[in-house]
Amino acid sequence: MATELKSPQQQIFDAVFLIAKNLGYSTFDYLPPKEEGVPYPFVFIGEQFDQDQRTKSMIYGNIQQTVHIFHTYKKRRELTTMMDKLKIGFRKLKRTDNFYIRYLNINAQTIIDHSTGEPLLHGIIEVEYQFH
């Protein structure tokens, strides 16, 4: 039985996840609830938007991956260092198992997050790739 290939979207998600994990960061594919007691900082590989193009013989397109980093309010320097290291890693991504990847753009922002009852720093990185 032939193994079904992962979609380009899943391959890029997995590669971005591994970049964060290999940098030594606690990394999740879901936003852990406060009840789980996950310590700060942590990385959440979140939303993904994709625009596929198909030719007769292949698929290509663009993907925007959003990565969230949460840290305690008084650790801005540590948060921005994490964000910088992640962005460097994301820029180096050139290939997945079955697709060539070209980094197109990175947008980042740091906001104050009050969703947990205690102020947090919330770093948001949006990285755009083209795959073929």
Image: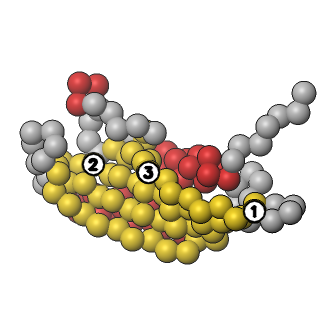
Residue type, label 2: Phe
* Marks 1, 2: nearer the viewer: 1
Question: Which label number is shown at residue 47?
Answer: 3
Question: Which of the two labelled residues, at mark 3 and mark 2, occupies the earlier sequence position?
Answer: 3
Disc 1 and disc 2: Cα gap in Å? Answer: 37 Å
Q: Which residue is disc 2 drawn over?
A: 70
C-beta proximity under 8 Å, tags 1 and 2: no
Residue type, label 3: Glu
* Marks 1, 3: nearer the viewer: 1
Q: SS at mark 2?
A: strand
Label 2 neighbour load within 10 Å: few <14, some 14-19, many 20+ = many
Residue 13, compared with residue 3, is above or below; it is: below
Question: Which of the two labelled residues, at mark 1 and mark 2, occupies the earlier sequence position?
Answer: 1
Question: Which of the two labelled residues, at mark 1 and mark 3, occupies the earlier sequence position?
Answer: 3
Residue 71, compared with residue 108, is above or below; it is: above
Q: Which residue is disc 1 drawn over?
A: 54
